[in-house]
Image (cartoon, rainbow, N blue to C red):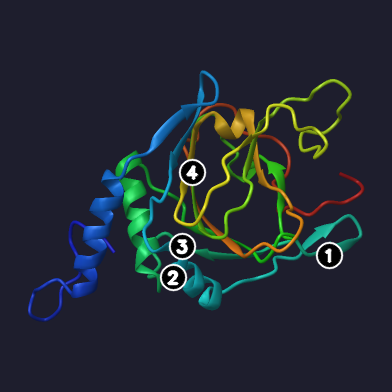
């Protein structure tokens, strides 16, 4: 739903919902974000309380989004990732005007077109995602990944994508060297840019005890420049012969 040309009724006037989205887009575009440089070529923008009234939106998205378990083939059986997921196309009409406004504001602020809305639902502290890079984008030299949190505050880790001595895999949970915990709360925005997907890992670790649900909404973009990433993405099947 373009902000510059809101849909009009028979009278030619913009609807009330169009005006509401337009006003929210303007407010979100102008909202302050604090940029932190992770290294010379990677950065993260952080906006605390970027989206107002996020708790009410969390409840609506939790109860009505088309959640799926997303079973994946891992060597000899299907496994369920410890979280639920949902997806909306970039041009799709969403039942959540706040997310439409967020998408339009981010597109305007960064001057890029994102690939759609990716949603992840962490139902409790047992749901998680290991630290990783978004290799599905393939071109990681220049990317922008925006992540909006709804619901409970959870640890959200960034760590350098390097192999320390004695380690064999990048996402070894025992390696906590260089970890930065941004711990976003409801309505907080995190935007990773530059070479952050090439040189840094991000993830949501498990949390012991009672923890409320958390939903993350992600928008991703790649410039498609540089050398493309080799190897399968996260969702690709894993077999013993590969």
Q: Nearer the viewer, mark 1 or mark 4?
A: 4
Q: Earlier in the sequence, mark 4 or mark 2?
A: 2
What is the CA distance from the residue labelled 2 to the residue labelled 3? 23 Å
Q: Residues within 10 Å of mark 2 (few under 14, many from 20)?
A: few
Please tell me whether mark 2 sits on a helix, a strand or a loop: helix
What is the CA distance from the residue labelled 1 to the residue labelled 2? 35 Å
Which residue extends farthest bottom? 10
Q: Earlier in the sequence, mark 1 or mark 4?
A: 1
The numbered dot on residue 89 is: 3
Q: Nearer the viewer, residue 208 or 230?
A: 208
What is the CA distance from the residue labelled 3 to the residue labelled 1? 26 Å
What is the CA distance from the residue labelled 3 to the residue labelled 4? 21 Å
Residue at 18 percent across and 56 percent down: it is 4
Q: Earlier in the sequence, mark 1 or mark 2?
A: 2
The numbered dot on residue 158 is: none
Residue at 83 percent across and 36 percent down: it is 174
According to the image, label 4 marks what residue? 190
What is the CA distance from the residue labelled 1 to the residue labelled 4? 32 Å
Please tell me whether mark 4 sits on a helix, a strand or a loop: strand
Q: Position of residue 188 (x, y in %)?
A: 46, 50
What is the CA distance from the residue labelled 4 to the residue labelled 2? 20 Å
Residue at 38 percent across and 50 percent down: it is 50
Which residue extends farthest front? 209
Position of 230 with respect to 198 (left or right) is: right
Position of 2 with respect to 131 (left or right) is: left
Q: Is residue 79 above or below residue 192?
A: below
The numbered dot on residue 56 is: 2
Q: Nearer the viewer, residue 45 or 230?
A: 45
Position of 162 with respect to 10 (left or right) is: right
Q: Position of residue 109 (x, y in %)?
A: 31, 42
């Amino acid at each position: 739903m373009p902000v510059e040309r809101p849909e009009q009724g028979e009278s030619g006037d913009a609807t009330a919902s169009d005006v509401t989205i337009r006003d929210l887009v303007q407010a979100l575009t102008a909202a302050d974000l604090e940029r932190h440089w992770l290294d010379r070529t990677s950065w993260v923008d952080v906006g605390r309380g970027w989206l107002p009234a996020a708790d009410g939106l969390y409840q609506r998205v939790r109860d009505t989004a088309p959640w799926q378990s997303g079973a994946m083939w891992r060597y000899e059986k299907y496994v369920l990732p410890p979280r639920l997921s949902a997806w909306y196309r970039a041009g799709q009409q969403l039942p959540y005007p706040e997310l439409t406004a967020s998408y339009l504001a981010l597109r305007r602020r960064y001057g890029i077109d994102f690939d759609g809305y990716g949603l992840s639902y962490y139902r409790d502290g047992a749901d998680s995602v290991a630290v990783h890079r978004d290799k599905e984008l393939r071109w990681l030299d220049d990317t922008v990944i925006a992540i909006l949190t709804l619901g409970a505050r959870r640890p959200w880790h960034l760590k350098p994508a390097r192999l320390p001595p004695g380690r064999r895999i990048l996402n070894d949970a025992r390696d906590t060297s260089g970890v930065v915990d941004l711990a976003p709360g409801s309505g907080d925005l995190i935007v990773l840019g530059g070479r952050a997907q090439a040189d840094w890992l991000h993830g949501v670790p498990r949390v012991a005890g009672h923890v409320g649900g958390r939903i993350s909404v992600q928008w991703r973009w790649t410039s498609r420049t540089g050398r493309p990433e080799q190897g399968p993405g996260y969702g690709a099947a894993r077999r013993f012969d590969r």
